[in-house]
Amino acid sequence: MSALDTIRVGIIGCGGIANGKHMPSLKKVPGVQMVAFCDIIVERAEKAAKQYGTPDAKVYEDYKELLEDKTIDVVHVCTPNRAHSFITVDALEAGKHVMCEKPMAINSAEAKKMLDAAERTGKFLTIGYQNRQTSEALFLKEEADRGTFGDIYFARAFAVRRRAVPTWGVFLNEYEQGGGPLIDIGTHALDLTLWMMNNYKPKYCVGTTFHALNNDTDQGNAWGNWDPAKFTVEDSAFGFVVMENGATVSLDAAWALNTLEVREACTMLCGTKAGGDMLDGVRINGIRQNRQYVFKPSFSAGGAAFYEGASDNDPSAKDMAQWIATIRGQKAAPTVLPEQAYTVTRILEGIYTSAKTGDIYRF
């Protein structure tokens, strides 16, 4: 394919994440046409087709019918987590490249099926970890790759909300989602951290999950009160992961926690030469000429008295642009490799398993 080729995309799952991220971001990429929309609630697919589709866009209730269209190049899987694996595998087998929304799957066995299908078909598969595309994350990753931090032997991954439990869709449904904040937002923080470390070889982990606040009646929730009877997933989870080389990662994930230390998709890296974090913009710390220093780059586009510019920091749009560039052959591979996302899923599963058994989980 060339940079001028039209890329025809089918959307499977037309709910919140498709409307909030995938479809508006794909619309910004030149030469992309959204030509097919599928949802088990067909009215959602019809609405999406009218808003984002080509004039002749087709609407489906059964995703398998969408996959029969040989003119579709790419499929985006934006369904609840339980459906990620089998839809992705079917799409790859149908000859489509696939971007699947995070997490890769509800467990490592389902994720492995996706990985194997991508290898078997030779089609591109990527997972929607768009937080790698923030200006802050890209800067920190470049520093890590340059060796600024030396060997990163300790890191923390943060995805903590004080009271922001998602009350729509199936977020609170363990069967559909496979878990709560750990698999929902903790997955972003863990992906960022492993990517920065370039370390995908876990040895063992321990984890705890809590249902400590699920039954609260005074909730103070950002999106209105949740129904305690439907809140079947954890409200917070914490993991401690040791990699094969001894490097250690601490992971905090919560939708509801009595804390003022709130941040999402954040990482902190400690290496033999320096440290870095995303806790207040980007900060790099170290020693120079026997003095402690902190370096904090600016990501503002300002500089003129009459202009207070904002940074070019639309991570979802950047993510879609690099993904389509991969399909067109302008990049050798997507930024998020399926084997990387598979490791994230393995670790999340390990933390959940450790929490249930009370024992160390060994990979």
Image (cartoon, rainbow, N blue to C red):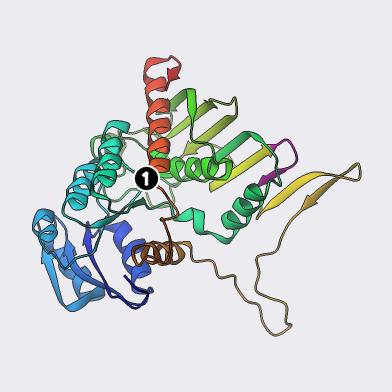
Q: Measured along the vertical axis of the image, is residue 306 above or below residue 299?
A: below
Q: Nearer the viewer, residue 93 or 345?
A: 93
Residue farthest along the bottom direction in this orientation: 306
278 in the magenta segment: yes
- Picture coordinates of residue 349 (x, y %)? 37, 29
Q: Nearer the viewer, residue 41 or 147?
A: 147
Q: Is residue 86 visible?
A: yes
On-image quarter of the N terminus: bottom left
Q: Residue at x 10, y 58 (%)?
A: 61
Q: Residue at x 57, y 45 (%)?
A: 196
Q: Which residue is mark 1?
A: 338
Task: From the viewer's perspective, tell me whether residue 212 is left or right of residue 308.
Answer: left
Find the magenta span and give its range. 271-279
On-image quarter of the C terminus: top left
Q: Nearer the viewer, residue 183 or 124?
A: 124
- Picture coordinates of residue 273 (x, y %)? 75, 40
Q: Measured along the vertical axis of the image, is residue 33 above or below residue 110?
A: below
Under circle 1, the secondary element is helix
- Picture coordinates of residue 280 (x, y %)? 66, 52
312 in the magenta segment: no
Task: From the viewer's perspective, tell me whether residue 108 is left or right of residue 321.
Answer: left
The image quarter in which residue 39 lies: bottom left
Residue type beneath disc 1: Pro
- Picture coordinates of residue 272 (x, y %)? 73, 35
